[in-house]
Image: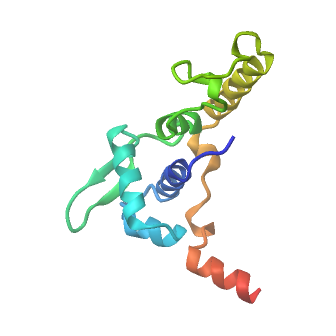
Amino acid sequence: MRLTDYTDYALRVLMYLGAHRGRLVTIQEIATMHGISRNHLSKVVHRLAVARLVATVRGRTGGLRLARDPGEITVGEVVRLTEPDFMMVECFDEARNQCSLSPTCILKRSLARATRAFLEELDALPLAAVLIPAQQAVPMAQSRLLTTTG
């Protein structure tokens, strides 16, 4: 199973905001930190704000912050919000399923259990457990310098 870049970016945004809870953070700051397009992050932030995971403050001195305590947000909640579906195989989609093995397939049940276990594990993981202290985070530009010179 592979998560989309959209989910990866959403998790990065939340982790960054969680590590910088004492102040407002700009989208540009997060984009620079992670070497991600500001436009992509704007779409992600909008979705997180609609879901009330992120609070936005407009204006010249505006920015973003977590809308809830990081201990109350689970990684599973974020993954469910940002992933379009968990159709690991065609037969998970009843409307489009063309597999002739579906009625008797044992693999389908195992894959469904594995997907449930995956999400249950992420449901047990609060955002607070994956936060890196702000002072330990290395901006993407510095990270590139460290890997090319070190």
* Residue at 31% over, 60% down: 63
Above or below, comparing residue 145 to residue 139 in the picture? below
Q: Which quadrant: the N terminus?
A: top right
Q: Is residue 150 visible?
A: yes
Report the residue at 33% width, 49% height from top: 46
Residue 40 on image: x %, y %:
41, 60
In the image, residue 86 sits, relative to residue 29, either above or below, namely: above
Front in this rendered view, residue 44 or 71: 44
Residue at figure coordinates x 41%, y 59% from the top left: 41
Residue, far bottom? 149
Image quadrant containing the C terminus = bottom right
Where in the figure is residue 127, as x and y percent of width and height? 57, 43
Q: Is residue 107 above or below residue 72?
A: above
Count every numbered label the image shows and give the total: 0
Q: Nearer the viewer, residue 150 or 87?
A: 87
Rendering quarter of residue 91: top right
- Classify residue 148 as left or right of residue 23: right
- Please tell me whether residue 76 is drawn above or below residue 140 in the rendered image: above
Q: What percent of the width, then of the height, locates residue 94?
A: 56, 18
Would residue 25 be visible to someone looking at this image? no
Residue in view at x 74 percent, y 26 percent? 114
Q: Residue furthest top?
A: 103
